[in-house]
Amino acid sequence: MKTSKYFISARMDDFVLYYNLVNDTLLQLPADRNEGCVECLQNPNNTRSIYWSKLYEDKFIIEDDFDELKEIQRRHWRTVNSADELNVTVISTLRCNSDCIYCYQRNLDFEYAEMTEEDFDRLYAFLLGAPQKNIHINWYGGEPLLVRDRILKFCAKADKDKKHTYSYSISTNASIYDDRFFRMMERYRLTNVTVSMVGTGEIHNGLRPSAEYGSDRVIRNIISMMRHTNVIVNLNLCKSNIGNIIEIFEELSGYRHSSLSFSFSRIVSYEHRPCAEIELDVDTYMQHVIRLANWALDHQFRVSDMSCFQNLGVYCGAYARNNYVVGPGLYLYQCDRSYDPEDSFAQIVDGALRYQPNGIGCGNTELCLDPYKVDECNACRLLPYCNGGCDYLRKIGKSACPPEKNYLEEYLKLYYRIFYERR
Ligand code: SF4
Ligand code: SF4
């Protein structure tokens, strides 16, 4: 017998959590029993220990010939090749009514490109032939609400497609609220809206300058959207707004028991839109995320799970073959960080995919990244957790590791609080 290479544990008040990263089992043990459990894990052949059968059953202790790497590799490829649902992110427009000082889509020659009526029609025609029964579309931008009439027209057509069941989500800055649009989208199976926010008042105005709207309008619109769907407020953190984040929670405190939840992301400086002076380093960012998420839970707000616990074997949709990002001109990308036709791996032409000769993407099997061939990942005990991390960052020469890499114990505690504490 041997002990699994892939588990983590964390002490929480008077108990200890154990999480098996390969098969996702979570054990909770009174702290005064932890010593016996640790001893058993150190001596996996001691079958007389009272902890042994549970640890064996949940694969913390495994047979000598059990190949954990093969097991997680199987899970990875099963999801990469899964045909259950087609997920499509549609960059409907690259136009926006904000001028965010950190936006990664800025300073680009093709900044104002957007999907034409014809693009929408051709996308629909292409999806008619999709073999999957379920199709989920995330309307993305730029600001997708700027082309809401085209989106509604598409959804009305898709609603008549008897072969497929469509559902939708929207990523927006919440500057625009159109009641008819949200009423109709609710009817067409809108599952959630993700709203990015940076702060209130002058903090918002400084980071997200716009002649058209301020943070008051964003808050009002979030409240209106909640009448029709779940809203996830994604708080974009940087040096300039870290002291202002609690104010966003407070502005929405009357809605904490409704369909509202919060998540966090880090504002990152990219070469074509540098904002290094406001970027938080990963450690500082993580410390703030852990502090703010725990504060929010203490104050009865809902926090979305941001971890990769209970994952399906891929870090993100960019690894899966049934996951496309489609942009203007119906070019296809591996992930939503790419929107330049030169980086696309294919284009939808005459209802079919035409692969680009040098394109990179998971739709093109041969070029799809295999995290098990990356030496650093193969040797890493977090591989079943992150499955190779962010391939986009790897490609631009940055670290692919998830920001929580060195904070997994804290993340496990948050995970426990999010899913089990309220029950
Ligand atoms: S991306 Fe980073 S954390 Fe993930 S397996 Fe590779 S080296 Fe480990
Ligand atoms: S590869 Fe990275 S940037 Fe692209 S979707 Fe995945 S996590 Fe996001």
Image (tube, rainbow, N blue to C red):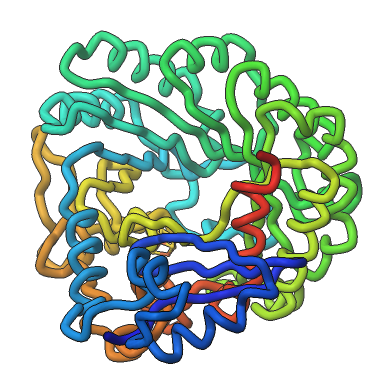
In the displayed structure, would residue 76 be above or below residue 211? below
Residue at horizontal 34 percent and vertical 71 percent from the top: 56
Name the residue nearer the viewer: 145 or 47.
Answer: 47
Quarter occupied by the C terminus? top right
Name the residue nearer the viewer: 271 or 15.
Answer: 15
Q: How many marks?
A: 0
Residue 144 percent location from the top left of the image: 51, 34
Residue 282 percent location from the top left of the image: 65, 78
Residue at horizontal 54 percent and vertical 39 percent from the top: 171
Q: Is residue 261 visible?
A: yes
Residue at horizontal 45 percent and vertical 90 percent from the top: 42
Quarter occupied by the N terminus? bottom left
Name the residue nearer the viewer: 145 or 399.
Answer: 399
- Say which quarter of the image contains residue 252: top right
Name the residue nearer the viewer: 72 or 227.
Answer: 72
- Say which quarter of the image contains residue 71: bottom left
Residue 244 percent location from the top left of the image: 88, 56
Q: Is residue 390 visible?
A: no
* Quarter of image, ligand 2: bottom left
In the displayed structure, would residue 243 be above or below residue 324? below
